[in-house]
Amino acid sequence: MNEIIELLSYNFFQNAMGAAILASISCGIIGTYIVARRIVFISGGITHASFGGIGMAWFLGLNPVFGAAVFGVFSALGIEWVSKKTDVRQDSVIGILWALGMALGIIFIYMTPGYAPNLMSYLFGSILTVSNLDLYLLAGLCVLTILVFALMMRPIVYVAFDEGYAQTHRAPVQFLNYLMIALVALAIVLNIRVVGIILVISFLTIPQTIANMFTQDFGKMILGAIGFGILGSLSGLFIAYKLNIPSGATIIFSFVILFILAKVVQLSLLKLKRKAA
Amino acid sequence: MTKLLEIKSVYAGYDNKIVLKDVNLVVKKNDFLGIIGPNGGGKTTLLKVILGLIKPIEGSVEFNNIDDNLIGYLPQINTIDQKFPIPVQEVVLSGLMSHKKLFGRYRAEDKDKAKVLMEQMGILHLSNKNIGELSGGQLQRVFLCRAIISDPQILILDEPDTYVDSNFEMELYGVLDKLNDHMAIIVVSHDIGTISSHVKTIACVNGSLCYHDSNVINQEQLKTYNCPIDLITHGEVPHRVLKKH
């Protein structure tokens, strides 16, 4: 117990907890959209494409988050545009962008003279070293996401559910699709700092899938995903510190444990219901 | 009778493929039009033209005296993701989208209206259920509620008789008969047997459109309309009239 209190007094650990909570909020909201609309693969493509931006920013001496944001948002808008305006198959395009982003990233980083950046921290995240700037960016993302959903959750959900029908109502389908895919890209890029490129997709899908076991309502699913996100990421953080193992991977691992526990609870609830009926 | 909608020599299709050729159609108040035709003949394309989802390559679609937002639409059910996390009540409320614009709030009276409709359709007890838990017939009822909650003047249904049993089919056409008192109805079906006893007029769509100003149609007429589909006649014992082979 004393150990935990001592841990909480460290600045780096406070930052890490702040990052975990902010990541859970933004990923909880955006991830629910991703899971509901079945665009997990698109999100994976955006994630890996943004690595090209990280490499380019290193090469040009810019902030990597900035490079990742530019690459992420443009590849997201590109995927949306290609799949709507041309008859190229969307998943093939995603596959190409996915590989291209990773390849560009590696080439740029290799070409950067002098000190080689810590690749591992981008691939697997480094929540224990998040800066104040990272926290501000994450907080800004949370505010933006909450604002968008507070104002437009119904149109967003209705368009995601049945785009053709929304069009017959002259809903701004295109605007909402581009807005959402850009938000998805921003959420991915900013959260890469916390859990890394390889693991960010789990932050966007596992808590949502757990919440989806217990509710079918989009709004409640968001709240559930945020809750399970905070629970999983904080316990992962403590375990990682205690056992001195990589934090990003431990957070994902605790998500999966939560998922299994939730599945057991869900199945036994079902059994009870059947017995009662 | 008031014209609600007039389609004049419309050509429409996708990319370079023209599906509809020189289609003319007038929909008047209290019309109950059945659209039949073979698969790929352009039934759904015609609906999309009317709904404004596809712009015609040539020709015009004119609405008379009505806001074109006021078309109720029930899409084919297999175009819908039934695992999407959305409860029944929300689906019904989404029928008010055009009234709400982007930042519109949904008020208590909107929810009351949805409740009244769901009660009439016998699905009020399902209002908090996810759409994935419903049967085909229940799902069609939900989408019918969504289509009519905005009090449209034209109601368009795209194959409402798929995935449902004949019991529901009877109920559905009973409901449509009542709705027909205050809105024109266009229903697409490949089962001409069931629709022809309920609709007032029939249009055959197979590239071009042939309008038949009655709900009785025979195989000869279908042939001259260039509409190669099977015909089931009405009578004591329903039987299928097939071509000689």
Image: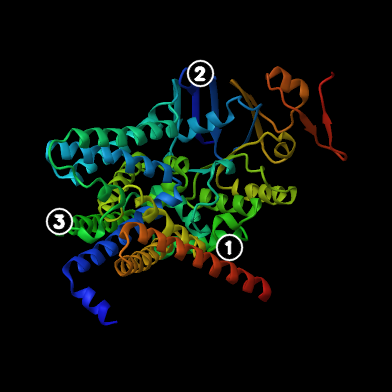
Q: Position of residue A102 (x, y in %)?
A: 31, 37
What residue appears at the point 76 percent right and 28 percent down from the top-left corner?
A: B230
* Secondary structure category for the residue under label 1: helix
Seen in the picture, residue B208 relative to B51 is either above or below; the reply is above
**Residue at the bottom extreme, as displayed:** A2
Mark 3 neighbour class, 10 Å CA radius: few under 14, some 14 to 19, many 20 or more: few
Q: Give the alpha-carbon distance from disc 1 to disc 2, as whole Å.
A: 43 Å
Residue A63 on image: x %, y %? 15, 45
Q: Nearer the viewer, residue A132 or A84?
A: A132
Cα distance, mark 2 to mark 3?
54 Å
Tell which subunit mark 3 falls on.
A
Query: From the image, which quarter does the N terminus of chain B lie in?
Result: top right
Residue B48 lies, with reference to residue A39, above or below; the image says: above
Amino acid bearing label 3: Leu
Picture coordinates of residue B19 (x, y %)? 54, 21
The residue labelled by disc 3 is A133
Find residue A53 and report its image quarter: top left
Q: Earlier in the sequence, mark 1 or mark 2?
A: 2
**Chain for numbered disc 1:** B
Toward the viewer: A71 or A157?
A: A71
| Marking on residue B126 | 1
Question: Is residue A18 visible to us here?
Answer: yes
In the image, is A163 to the left or to the right of A63? right
B156 to the left or right of A199: right
Left or right placement of residue A254 versus residue B91 in this view: left
Callout 2: chain? B
The amino acid on which the numbered mark 2 sits, given as a three-letter code, is Lys
Residue under the point 20% across and 58% down: A130
On the rendered structure, is B242 left or right of B67?
Answer: right
Residue type at tag 1: Leu
* Residue at which label 2 appears: B17
